[in-house]
Image (spheres, rainbow, N blue to C red):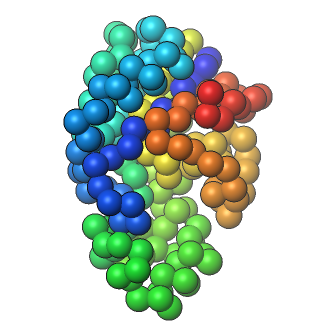
Amino acid sequence: MEVYLIRHTTPDIAKGTYYGQTDISLPRSYEFDFDALKKKIPRKFDAVFSSPLSRCRLFARELDTNVFKSDDRILEMNFGDWEMKKWNEIDKEPFEHWMNNFDSVAPPNGESFRSLYTRVIEFYDEQVLSGDYDTVAIVTHGGVIRALLNHILDIPLTKAFSYELDFGSVTLVDKNGGWAKVNI
């Protein structure tokens, strides 16, 4: 089975803002981004799974499939009290502690990367691996894609940010982790 991990296109928000689970819209030019993204993927999928946030769901709904499901478990990381704050508005000491221990430490009232990883892998095992699919699209967020790659390729969680995932990127993997092509 081929699994296409598709990161949403660039959201309409100032750079340097933590927006995790906040439902941020896309800029008016999103259709041009969608056209470019469609050139990287198959015309039809056996199943399409999407984060419920509009920045993912808008594109996912444009994909041709017989099975479409939105799932809260593939929401981006919950940044808690840091949602909608700029990086430079967050107290330096707790921010640095989180940055150095993101896998096990959560932002205040948020979740750690390990918590995100746990819910994402539960989704993947239940929805993707249990289905009889040849091609699957998962339209979601950078953190979710990193968690899936860590799981599929057996990469330690502490290495989740060692590879780049651009907005509108497509990462293709096989379900057994035999290979991955990042940013195709």
Decide which of 82, 17 is in the foreground and name it. Answer: 17
Rendered location of residue 109, percent (x, y): 33, 75
Rendered location of residue 108, percent (x, y): 37, 79
Rendered location of residue 119, percent (x, y): 45, 50
Residue 49 vs 91, above or below: the answer is: above
Name which residue lies at 54% across and 62% down: 114
Rendered location of residue 56, percent (x, y): 33, 36
For the image, the number of numbered tags is 0
Name which residue lies at 67% across and 25% down: 174
Q: Is residue 129 visible?
A: no
Q: Residue furthest right?
A: 178
- Quarter of the figure with residue 71: top left
Residue 174 horizontal side relative to residue 119, left or right: right
- Give the position of the N terminus as an image quadrant: top right
Name which residue lies at 41% across and 66% down: 16
Q: Is residue 135 visible?
A: yes
Decide which of 92, 133 is in the foreground and name it. Answer: 92
Residue 31 horizontal side relative to residue 74, left or right: left
Residue 118 vs 135, above or below: the answer is: below
- Quarter of the figure with residue 175: top right
Decide which of 52, 12 is in the foreground and name it. Answer: 12
Name which residue lies at 52% across and 35% down: 169
- Quarter of the figure with residue 45: top left
- Give the position of the C terminus as an image quadrant: top right
